[in-house]
Image (tube, rainbow, N blue to C red):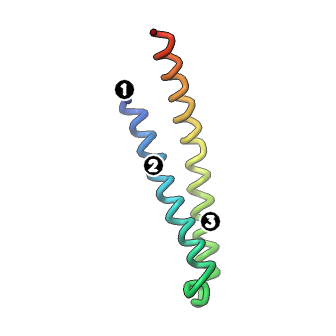
Amino acid sequence: MQVDKNTLGHLAEVYYLIGLAEKYRAQVIDLGSGIQSALSGSQERRQQYQSFLVNTIEKLEPKLKDLVAHSAVARATRISKR
């Protein structure tokens, strides 16, 4: 199966944003428990990472929807050519 460059670019963006969201999620958890949570300023940093996480998810959601829609169109096109 071939993937056009546009779809591949969108897929790369989605993959990057998912990785970034996971990084921010891990930071939020780390700053909310254990030694990290006891450090001064951790609550402010935790809120900052929560904000980064929300921003990233807000960027990710429409890109995922576009990718899924494009995939559905491509699949329908392949089926109709059979």
Residue 1's label in the rendered image is 1
Q: Would residue 3 appear left or right of 36 to someone viewing this image? A: left
The residue at which mark 3 appears reads as: 51
User: Few, some or many C-alpha atoms within 10 Å of disc 2 (few <14, some 14-19, many ≥20)?
Assistant: some
Residue lying at 56% horizontally and 48% vertically, measured from the top left? 60
Q: Would residue 9 appear left or right of 65 to someone viewing this image? A: left
User: For the residues marked 3 and 2, what is the alpha-carbon distance in whole angstroms?
Assistant: 20 Å
User: Few, some or many C-alpha atoms within 10 Å of disc 3 (few <14, some 14-19, many ≥20)?
Assistant: some
Q: Amino acid at mark 1?
A: Met
Tag in front: 3 or 1: 1
Residue lying at 56% horizontally and 76% vertically, measured from the top left? 30
Name the secondary structure under disc 1: loop
Q: Amino acid at mark 3?
A: Ser
User: For the residues marked 3 and 1, what is the alpha-carbon distance in whole angstroms?
Assistant: 38 Å
The residue at which mark 2 appears reads as: 15
Q: Would residue 31 appear left or right of 4 to someone viewing this image? A: right
> Quarter-wise, where is residue 2 in the image?
top left
Tag in front: 2 or 1: 1
- 69 relative to 33, above or below: above
User: For the residues marked 2 and 1, what is the alpha-carbon distance in whole angstroms?
Assistant: 19 Å
Residue lying at 38% horizontally and 30% vertically, measured from the top left? 3
Residue 8: image location, x then y, percent: 39, 37
